[in-house]
């Protein structure tokens, strides 16, 4: 255990020192990677812990980013207050969506989240008097003293570490255990007197809250928030981060987010076929590494150190049928 | 809205519904047997359009273009089923994810190959132009699409209800284990259904190319429409696809005319409502 | 253990706060060695067709000039923004911050343009904007952005007066419901009403609508004698198809905006396009040696006729090259460079004569165009009438123009 914590601390220190090693652009990519890592960790509360696949998280992410930007422009709020406002708004929206979705699982849950994501995208796209439509909404406000690119990177990194720690304790809390229990057997939870829908509701809310935090940071990072933030392809990217990283390993989704963000930056400088590469990665992960990067690596390590392998996990989502 | 406008808007809605049914029937067929959303269906549609376009340009024959679109995509679908989907058969999430990955690749390859311009497919000479129907000027091709959709609907209904293959498909929906025990090769039936779905997607791509043109992004557009259609009508049921197509076609047509700003609500609002209130669709199709 | 790790982290942070990393410096004052020019374009997404043309236009210029500007080899760093604001900012950041681009040419999409305008003002790099911009760029001050081909309303305004003069007094507009389409429409609607025309209604299909039949049904009983078409790319193709399919030809005159019947659209429509009337600042069939040479070499290189996007890419690179030559072979300070760009006039160009007014906005000739059968029987735009010296304000003084709001769906001209 100590070894692992030490390793993580070393990693964090290295990450803190990153701006001394690379230029502004790569620090920017690292900032983005850290923001996406927060989303991925949040999404994994739903996917890994809850066994529910959402393809609408970009909708929640964008809700938060737009709310931040709009609060700054129309309510004259600063970074922190607009951020709190946006988190509040996003939690409310998440609660509404969760209330609709938690009675279902599997394919139906997926479709409800998809429809919600499309609705947010449609609103951001069409309600142009509020959102600015395709032009997007001005953002990029950062708190005083954190305006330089590397300072903002440290802020985002700090939040990522905090979110990772909080979620670690959350998944081991009683609420986390109940969510896991519902994933593994809803019937058993019911017989124990817990409502599966309520556990899923909690999971969705936790996931939405974390996503909202990332949305606020994103609004500070980019000069505009635009409808593409809410687009289905963004939701798919988030999902891919979780799956490629490995949803069964606690920090797997963060690894997936970092790898994919850096890869995208590196690849799209060379070729215009990023979509093809992303598609092939998805296919390859599903076919050859269903546990994701970290899950597969861990499996290898375990085997080498002769620790008996964990029992095979059930597929992430149970079918609707 | 005047009387004429009302009639025309209704006609538009119905002809759009015809196209939607052609796309959605394949989609729902695959779902009914495999319980999986094939999110690459839109890419199948798009590639059908491009194959039809290329064939039409090369041969000048509309029949060949339609065949090329349908059979080309059916072949591609068959290969994908064999090489990719079969490996994860039964693991629903994996199947959906695979179809997402494949759709990303197919759309991107189409862009690389055919560029970004919107290309239109000329209708066959016999169906070009418009006819007057009781004071209403309507394009012949749109009328033909309605007719074609009805024919395909009848064909599929006959296939499902009156033939042995259909019986197996329907049985597969109800009880896969039982079929296995009886010695029916479920795998082969699944592959056949997948190919049939792809065939319908490819053919509708050619038809859709005449309707709207073939362009990058048409895949995602059609997929979302198909999704709304099958969700509203009821996942995995043929009658559901019919009802869903008509509802969505009309809602879209009137929605655009009356409340263009709320288009996304008009489309996804009902889908959300149905999912939450009647997850099995308006018709409550069997699952 | 944890305490020690915490201390280390704190120390690292303290160290970091004391000694911030040095910014990378790009030497923009060099006059030798390769020039890095970023090129931000929409090469996928709904605008991909136009975007490909724009890039090809730029490449054609480089091919014709041995790939050099002022004797310096040009390294064109092409980036695709997918038509998305976010990706646009992302790739431009990469060009500026990682690749050390001396300047950036782009983008195509209006939404990306507004974001890039905001972004480049925080950098030391000038932005050469090839495609008509939002009139945000007239209303607000962007000292490091040069709008090569003016603004979106600019080239549609003259059609307003012309329509009334030709007896089209009652008009319906159908324009894409996003920033660029609203601006295109606003330019027309403002001048049309100022000239005494009556705007019966305005129809706003979303960009990328699948089916245009529902919009046609709204036009079927309209008393209007002309329809102003402010649609772009694929949408315009779909509209023209539906128009013909529903037997609308001849019921009302179609008046095309600058982008609506551009070559990028005509390619998708084919022979049916012959006879379409539109307004624009570029006409690939203009009877002029420069335009003819450009159309021919473009067709030779890419097997298609050039659209105005192609011409814009070509001109943007040409203008940049002239400015670099006038600036002693370097880009230098962004604002200085843009001042040099503003000082350049074109007695003639592939577009026609161009001057730049005191506010730094280019002034173009605008053409009334008619589609005719061109080389190889392909449809192309020919010039029927030329309106010289059209500036950004539609004939108003800057004081008056700037006192009005920015064109949007809510503001379509007139005194607010």
Image: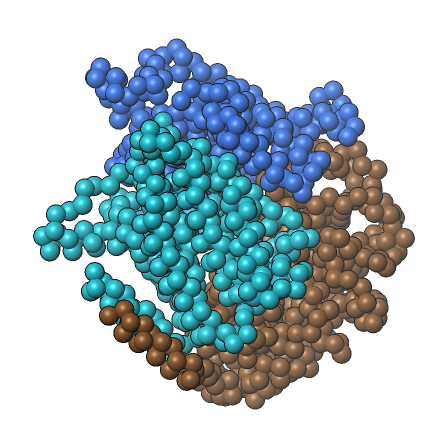
Task: Please state if B82 lies on the left or on the right of B236 as rendered.
Answer: left
Q: How many marks?
A: 0
Taking the spot 61% from the left edge, 69% from the top edge, the residue there is C117
Taking the spot 80% from the left edge, 37% from the top edge, the residue there is C222
**Which hue is chain C drawn in?**
brown
Q: Judging from the image, what is the letter of the chain drawn in cyan?
A: A
**Which hue is chain B drawn in?**
blue
Q: Is residue C394 above or below residue C240?
A: below
Image x and y of residue A125, in percent: 60, 50
Foreground residue among A161 and C85: A161
Foreground residue among B135 and A6: A6
Foreground residue among C271 and C15: C15
Image x and y of residue A91, in percent: 52, 49
Instruction: Assign the C terminus of chain C to one quadrant of the image.
Output: bottom right
Taking the spot 45% from the left edge, 16% from the top edge, the residue there is B157
Q: Is residue A269 visible?
A: no
* Furthest-right residue in this view: C196
Q: How is the image coloured?
A: by chain
Q: Is residue B175 above or below residue A32?
A: above
Instruction: Assign the N terminus of chain C to one quadrant of the image.
Output: bottom left
């Amino acid at each position: 255990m100590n070894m692992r914590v030490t390793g993580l601390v070393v990693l964090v220190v290295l990450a803190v020192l990153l701006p001394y090693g690379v230029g502004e652009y790569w620090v920017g990519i690292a900032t983005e990677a850290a923001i996406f890592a927060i989303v991925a960790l949040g999404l994994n509360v739903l996917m890994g812990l809850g066994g529910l696949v959402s393809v609408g998280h970009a909708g929640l992410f964008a809700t938060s980013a737009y709310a931040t930007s709009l609060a700054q422009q129309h309510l004259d709020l600063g970074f922190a207050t607009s951020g709190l406002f946006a988190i509040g708004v996003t939690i409310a929206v998440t609660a509404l969506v969760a209330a609709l979705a938690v009675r279902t699982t599997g394919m139906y849950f997926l479709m409800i989240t998809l429809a919600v994501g499309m609705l947010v995208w449609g609103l951001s796209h069409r309600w142009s008097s509020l959102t600015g439509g395709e032009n997007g909404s001005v953002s990029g406000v950062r708190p005083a003293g954190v305006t330089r690119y590397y300072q903002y990177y440290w802020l985002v990194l700090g939040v990522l570490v905090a979110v990772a720690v909080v979620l670690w304790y959350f998944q081991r809390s009683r609420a986390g255990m109940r969510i896991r229990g519902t994933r593994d057997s809803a019937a058993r939870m019911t017989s124990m007197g817990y409502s599966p829908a309520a556990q899923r509701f909690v999971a969705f809310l936790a996931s939405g809250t974390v996503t909202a935090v990332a949305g606020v940071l994103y609004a500070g990072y980019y000069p505009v928030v635009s409808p593409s933030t809410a687009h289905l392809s963004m939701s798919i990217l988030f999902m891919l981060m979780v799956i490629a990283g490995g949803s069964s390993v606690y920090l797997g989704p963060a690894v997936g987010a970092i790898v994919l963000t850096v890869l995208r930056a590196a690849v799209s400088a060379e070729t215009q076929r990023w979509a093809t590469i992303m598609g092939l990665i998805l296919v390859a992960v599903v076919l050859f590494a269903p546990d994701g990067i970290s899950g597969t690596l861990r499996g290898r390590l375990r085997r080498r150190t002769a620790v008996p392998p964990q029992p095979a996990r059930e597929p992430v989502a149970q079918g609707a049928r | 809205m005047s009387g004429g406008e009302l009639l025309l808007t209704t006609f538009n809605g119905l002809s759009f519904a015809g196209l939607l049914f052609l796309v959605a029937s394949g989609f729902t067929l695959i779902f009914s047997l495999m319980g999986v959303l094939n999110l690459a269906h839109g890419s199948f549609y798009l590639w059908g359009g491009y194959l039809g376009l290329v064939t039409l340009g090369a041969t000048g024959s509309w029949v060949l273009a339609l065949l090329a679109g349908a059979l080309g995509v059916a072949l591609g679908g068959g290969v994908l089923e064999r090489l990719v989907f079969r490996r994860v058969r039964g693991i629903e999430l994996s199947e959906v994810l695979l179809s997402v990955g494949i759709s990303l690749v197919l759309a991107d390859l189409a862009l690389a190959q055919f560029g970004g311009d919107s290309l239109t497919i000329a209708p066959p000479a016999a169906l070009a132009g418009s006819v007057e129907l009781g004071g209403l000027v309507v394009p012949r091709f749109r009328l033909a699409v309605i007719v074609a959709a009805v024919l395909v609907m009848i064909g599929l209904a006959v296939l499902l209800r009156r033939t042995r293959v259909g019986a197996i498909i329907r049985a597969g929906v109800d009880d896969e284990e039982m079929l296995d025990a009886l010695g029916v090769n479920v795998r082969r039936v699944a592959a056949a259904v997948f190919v049939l779905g792809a065939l319908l997607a490819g053919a509708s791509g050619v038809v859709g190319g005449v309707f709207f043109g073939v362009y990058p992004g048409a895949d995602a557009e059609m997929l979302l429409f198909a999704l709304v259609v099958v969700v509203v009508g009821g996942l995995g049921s043929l009658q559901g696809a019919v009802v869903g197509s008509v509802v969505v076609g009309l809602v879209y047509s009137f929605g655009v005319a009356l409340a263009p700003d709320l288009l996304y609500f008009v489309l996804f609002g009902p889908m959300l409502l149905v999912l939450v209130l009647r997850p099995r669709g308006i018709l409550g199709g069997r699952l | 253990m944890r305490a020690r790790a915490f201390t280390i982290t704190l120390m690292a942070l303290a160290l970091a706060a004391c000694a911030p990393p040095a910014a990378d410096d790009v030497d923009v004052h060099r006059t030798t060695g390769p020039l890095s020019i970023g090129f931000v374009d929409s090469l996928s997404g709904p605008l991909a067709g136009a975007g490909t043309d724009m890039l090809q236009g730029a490449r054609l210029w480089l091919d014709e000039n041995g790939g050099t500007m002022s004797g310096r080899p040009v390294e064109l760093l092409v980036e695709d923004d997918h038509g998305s604001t976010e990706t646009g900012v992302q790739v431009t950041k990469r060009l500026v911050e990682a690749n050390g681009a001396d300047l950036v040419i782009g983008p195509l999409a209006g939404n990306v343009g507004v974001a890039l305008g905001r972004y480049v003002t925080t950098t030391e790099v000038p932005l050469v904007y090839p495609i008509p911009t939002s009139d945000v760029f007239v209303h607000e001050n962007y000292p490091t952005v040069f709008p090569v081909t003016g603004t979106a309303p600019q080239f549609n305004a003259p059609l307003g007066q012309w329509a009334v003069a030709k007896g089209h007094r009652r008009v319906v507009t159908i324009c894409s419901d996003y920033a660029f389409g609203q601006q295109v429409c606003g330019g027309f609607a403002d001048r049309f009403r100022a000239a005494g025309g009556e705007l019966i209604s305005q129809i706003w299909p979303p960009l990328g609508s699948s089916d245009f039949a529902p919009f046609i049904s709204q036009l079927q009983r309209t008393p209007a004698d002309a329809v102003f078409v402010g649609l772009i790319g694929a949408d315009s193709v779909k509209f023209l198809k539906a128009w013909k399919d529903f037997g609308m030809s001849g019921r009302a005159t179609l008046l095309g905006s600058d982008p609506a019947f551009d070559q990028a659209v005509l390619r998708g429509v084919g022979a049916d396009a012959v006879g379409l009337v539109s307004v624009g600042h570029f006409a690939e069939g203009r009877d002029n040696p420069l335009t003819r040479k450009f159309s021919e070499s473009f067709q030779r290189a890419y097997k298609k006729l050039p659209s105005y996007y192609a011409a814009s890419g070509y001109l943007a690179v040409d203008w940049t090259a002239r400015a670099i030559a006038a600036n002693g072979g370097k880009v230098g300070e962004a604002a200085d460079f843009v001042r040099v760009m503003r000082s350049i006039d074109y007695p003639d160009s592939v577009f026609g004569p161009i001057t730049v007014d005191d506010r730094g906005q280019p002034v173009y000739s605008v053409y009334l165009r008619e589609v005719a059968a061109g080389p190889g029987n392909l449809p192309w735009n020919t010039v029927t009438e030329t309106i010289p010296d059209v500036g950004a304000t539609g004939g108003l003084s800057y004081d008056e123009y700037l006192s009005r709001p920015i064109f949007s769906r809510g503001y379509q001209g007139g005194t607010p």
